[in-house]
Amino acid sequence: MFERILVTGASGRLGSNLAKRLSERGAKVRAFVLPDDPAEKTLTGLNVEIFYGDLRDEIAVEEAVEGCDAIAHCAAVMGLPKNMTPHTFFDINCRGSFNVFQAASEKADKIRRLVYLSSTSAYSVETTGPVITEDDTLTPPSLYGMTKIVNEAMLRTFRYQTGLKAVVLRPNFIMACDEILNGWRRPWVTGVLQRADERYTCYVPGVAEPWKIVEEAVPDPETRVIPFGPGRRPWTWHVTDVRDTVHAVECALENEKAIGETFCIAGPKPARWDEVVKHLCKRLDEEYVEVDLPNLWHFEFDLTKAGNVLGYDPQYSPVRMIDDAIAFRNGKNIDVIPPAIAHG
């Protein structure tokens, strides 16, 4: 175990649950939190040291790194908030990460591990696949994904220059508590189809406005949908439980073979919409509509490298996530900290 672990983004969906897990294992955790962050409540009751600072402040970051021998860099702004400019977004995500990597590199002889939480947003999951590996081309469709690629490149340079013992994880769409119950509705399907152009794996030449098929079959946007492509193949989506992501970070901190490597992180298997939606609706006593489409959206992440090299062994299937989510909504303690800002 490390002497002291710095967790950036410690009030977030992943950071809070990681801080909880590490502190329960007896680690000294320094939780990097923005001053006056309303999400700090996620850390209430945890045995962690709160360090207030802004990642854009290199002095604050240097002070936070002082005395630590491991870092889990989870902090990032995800979607661009309406009240934030793209320049500020880039500044937080990239200059903030530069400051973390720089401070760690200055103490590369003392930092025994730095785990960077990148994202599968570095790919375009809608244009890559259907099976995505660590070696696939990075073509981010979003500003968020672009910042992840920039940060990975910076980290490779720092590792080359100083020998910093770094590991990169690319988790896909992390969910916690009851978030998995919020989706699988009409807008998810129509949104993919409306964005699809010739670059998308689900694009079908000559098929115009396929989302209208869904809208006609499912008048209520709140209705759950099971989309099928040609041959009645169901759509899939590879979600990740926050507990599996915490497990991946633990593996990255502990496994020497992981140093210098990059890993895709996701659940045990892709979520088939027909299995997930039917199970969800049965448990919630809701109706669903099956829709046949000329378009098939299927992608999954190849976890072979994560299993063989990192030792990653995910346990939370979509069905298990749904069962735990319903238990959470019913007041049961599932030993997960709910996010202060939930996915829509």
Image: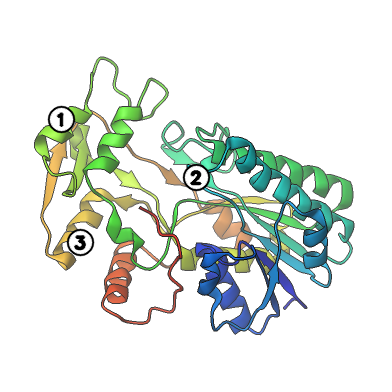
- In the rendered structure, are the residues bearing label 1 and label 3 in contact, judged by CB atoms less than 8 Å apart? no
Specify whether residue 247 is in view: no
Badge 3: residue crowd in 10 Å (few <14, some 14–19, many ≥20): some
Residue 81 badge: 2
Residue 188 seen in the figure: yes
Quadrant in which the N terminus appears? bottom right
Q: CA distance from mark 2 to mark 1?
A: 32 Å
- Residue 174, position in %: x, y? 46, 57
The circle on residue 213 is 1
Q: Going 60% across and 42% down the picture, which residue do you hit?
A: 89
Marks 2/3 in contact by CB < 8 Å: the verdict is no
- Dot 3 falls on a residue whose secondary structure is helix
Point 53% across, 64% down: residue? 14
Q: Residue at x 29, y 42 (%)?
A: 188
Give x and y (percent) for residue 244.
48, 65
**Which mark lies nearer to you, 2 or 3?**
2
Residue 264: image tag: none
